Image (spheres, helix red, strand yellow):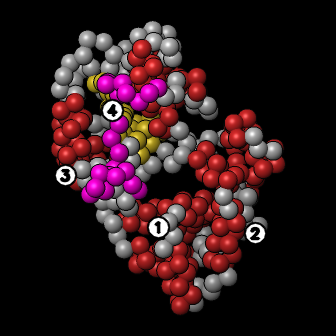
Amino acid sequence: MPSFKDIIGRDTELGIIRNALANNRLAHAYIFSGPEGIGKRLFARALAKALNCAAFDNDACNSCDDCLMADAGSHPLIMEFWPTDKDGKVTEAGVIKIEDIRALQNAIRYKVTRGKKTIIVEAADRLHPNAANAFLKTLEEPPDDTLIILITARPSSLFQTILSRCQRLNFAPLHTDIIRDWLIEKKGLEYEDAAAAARLSAGSMRTAVRCAETDEPKMRKELIEGLKSLDRDDTYGLLTLAETISKRDDLDDVLEFLKSWCRDMLVHSAGAGCLAINAVAPETKSAASAQDLISSYYMIEETQRHIAPPRYGNKQLFMEALLMGLAGHGALG
């Protein structure tokens, strides 16, 4: 399990948490929000480890029994809850069920003499509505010896009643230089390969690694070329492409890329093409207005929200509606 020294590019967030620890003002519940793959879970685990280190001095010591148990994933006061399917398997199609919340509530009933019970709820936006309602009272009045951390890439999908009961810590995308240098040091990439993967990452370390190790750049280029080749009046072509995209195993990653593409078109149209985050960034100004591009971005987000658990919307139907909408906004390039 990581410690604070393993966290890179998070000086602001570390400063906030360290200040809270130094002044005994740590909130009882946090929402760690930000795009996928930018280190929210790593940060949560480092905090959990620090809170339970017997020799804590601005960071976990990594050598006491508590740290060793945390590293082994067996510390009794550090608990993680993940979305699961009906068979209990952790999956992107899973949800956090009411049984998980009951287990969480039972686990925090017992007082501890030292350390802090730290509950990490991964992909909290996938709380089943019944589970979310059952969770409210716990979030409002958790035991003093308990910290709850909700991790999400889609905080807007959380109940407002949950948002209001937690302190939010927003994690911005990592700077491309940080990602590039990490890929060189940890993955042994050459400078040019690391720089290219970092540019494609949209600030996500996980995406950068995938870009470096797979054909992700090729997929992105082919996707954009396919979109740009379609006429907005070519309904058959749009529906065919929607069907193809909806069957992809990495559909959410595709939608994340489309959001970054909309962003790149927006900054390019504003004369700030140097801020584009994709190596396959648009080369000319978009015919779409800034408002159309912003609307397109939120259309993609809404599609993600509707096809994700616990809604499980029909992927093909939502992709058809999305591509027709993007075409209508002139956001296909």
Q: Which residues are magenta?
A: 71-92
Question: Which quarter of the image is occupied by the C terminus?
Answer: bottom right
Residue at (68, 62) in percent of width and height: 215
Dot 4 and dot 1 residues touching (CB under 8 Å): no
Provide the secondary structure element on which disc 3 rests: helix
Q: Mark 2 highlights which residue?
A: 284
Which circle's residue, 2 or 4, is located before the other in the chain? 4
How far is the residue under mark 4 from the one under mark 1? 35 Å
Query: Which amino acid, mark 2?
Result: Thr
Provide residue 326's location: percent of width, then percent of height.
54, 75
Q: Is residue 83 magenta?
A: yes
Provide residue 160's location: percent of width, then percent of height.
29, 47
- Bin the neighbour count of mark 4 within 10 Å (Cα to Cα): few under 14, some 14-19, many 20 and up: some
How far is the residue under mark 1 from the one under mark 3? 27 Å
Q: Which mark, by number, is residue 183? A: none
Dot 3 and dot 4 residues touching (CB under 8 Å): no
Q: Is residue 145 above or below residue 245?
A: above
Foreground label between 3 and 2:
3
Q: Mark 3 highlights which residue?
A: 130
How far is the residue under mark 2 from the one under mark 4? 49 Å
In-front residue for pair 272/277 = 277
Provide the secondary structure element on which disc 4 rests: strand
Which circle's residue, 1 or 3, is located before the other in the chain? 3
Provide the secondary structure element on which disc 2 rests: loop
Q: Is residue 191 above or below residue 29?
A: below
Residue at (49, 10) in percent of width and height: 57
Q: Mark 1 highlights which residue?
A: 299
